[in-house]
Amino acid sequence: MSHFLLFWLMFKFKILVNKCICIILFYTYKLKHKLFGGIMKKIFAVIALFFAFVSTSAVAKNDYSCDKKFIFFPGGPEGGPFGTIVYNGAVAAAEHTGCDVDYYWSQWNSEIMIKQFKEAVALQPDGIAIYGFPGDAAMRPIIQEAREMGIVITTMNTPLPDLEAEYKTEGFGYAGADLFDAGFNLGKKAVEVCGLQAGDKAFIWGLASMPNRGERTKGAIAGVEAAGVEVVYQEIPDNVNSDASQGTPMYVATYSANPDIKMAITDHGGLTASLPTYMKAAGHGTEEVCGAGFDLSAPIVDGINSGYIDVVIDQQPFIQGYMPIVQLFLSTKYGMAGLAMDTGAAFVTADNVGAVAPLAAVQIR
């Protein structure tokens, strides 16, 4: 009996010990799990915070704001059909980049532009966007002074090829057409659209005497003469260059002296827009003379729709205003080199004018 009792007591003790061990293991597991889980939660929270900080820092370190001051030359006169579209492009770019831009109108006059350019450099802005029609020689000393002062210069509409090559790595770019090619292509296209034959006569009114800018007029003459068409050429005088409405007497006199002229090409956006006025003053209807020229604007669209203007080449002046501001921003902010963009390639006739007329009405095309 005593052996049985001893055996029973030992059995119960073993069960009790096992229970104690299980209880100890259970609570030890829970305690470890609790501690481990808390630590892991803290570790994961730290990791998440770290990556959030790194991600935020990566975005924040790239500063795309613009705290620069630029001066932009839309051309002129203020409110003119071409210069206004260039101006609108620059205004849009200034809004998109946030850059501060002032605007100088120069009446398409080289002397006025050079004077204003000197004044602009004296103000020491971060960058200046300007037309190149005064030519490399006239612009060189002013641009050299500007570069010595750290001012970035870029051009539009009319290139300064020598200066662009010299300062390209310092942000000197160009937004505009390849002038000779644009002129040649329009001359060739106008002969085709107007149905001229070898031996016919065409009037070209342009700016062949101007350095660089004159290349477009020379291209138009070459394109027309390549078809065997005789060219009657007249240089646009300064007063007409600044105010196209003053060109009517000269146009009428040219046709009075050459009544067999079958086509007129005007190498000037304002003069092209005035072709209907000139033709009516000369007693021409829509069939007597075929009209061609450069650029696109609301008055030119009206001239195409009325039949007085048959074909124009659109050099997209809005882009010529927009891209120089972007160029100046990229160069002054990040030190990027000059960009070159050919903006002139599209012909507009009565067949496709409807597609661009709404944009021309709001002075974007």
Image (spheres, helix red, strand yellow):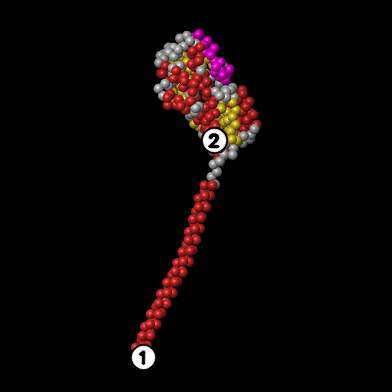
Q: Residues within 10 Å of mark 1 (few under 14, many from 20)?
A: few
Q: Which residues are magenta?
A: 238-258
Which of the two labelled residues, at mark 2 and mark 1, occupies the earlier sequence position? 1
Q: Which mark is residue 217?
A: none
Q: Residues within 10 Å of mark 2 (few under 14, many from 20)?
A: few
Q: Is residue 253 magenta?
A: yes
Query: Is residue 186 shown left or right of residue 77?
Result: left
**Quarter that holds the N terminus:** bottom left
Q: Nearer the viewer, residue 2 or 81?
A: 2
Q: Amino acid at mark 1?
A: Ser
Q: Position of residue 304 (x, y in %)?
A: 45, 20
* Residue 138: quarter of image: top right
Disc 2 element: helix
Q: Nearer the viewer, residue 245 or 339?
A: 245
Q: Is residue 144 magenta?
A: no
Residue with the most extreme right position: 122
C-beta proximity under 8 Å, tags 2 and 1: no
Q: Which residue is at 54% across, 23% downward?
A: 80
Q: Position of residue 194 (x, y in %)?
A: 42, 16
Task: Tell how many labels.
Answer: 2
- Judge depth for marks 2 and 1 and give the one in front: 1
* Residue 114: quarter of image: top right
Instruction: Identify the residue position indicated by label 1 in the image.
Output: 2
Q: Which residue is at 38% across, 85% downward?
A: 9
Q: Amino acid at mark 2?
A: Glu
Instruction: Identify the residue position indicated by label 2 in the image.
Output: 95
Q: Position of residue 78 (x, y in %)?
A: 57, 24
Q: Which residue is at 53% across, 19% downward?
A: 207
Query: Is residue 225 shown left or right of residue 325?
Result: left
Residue 174 seen:
no
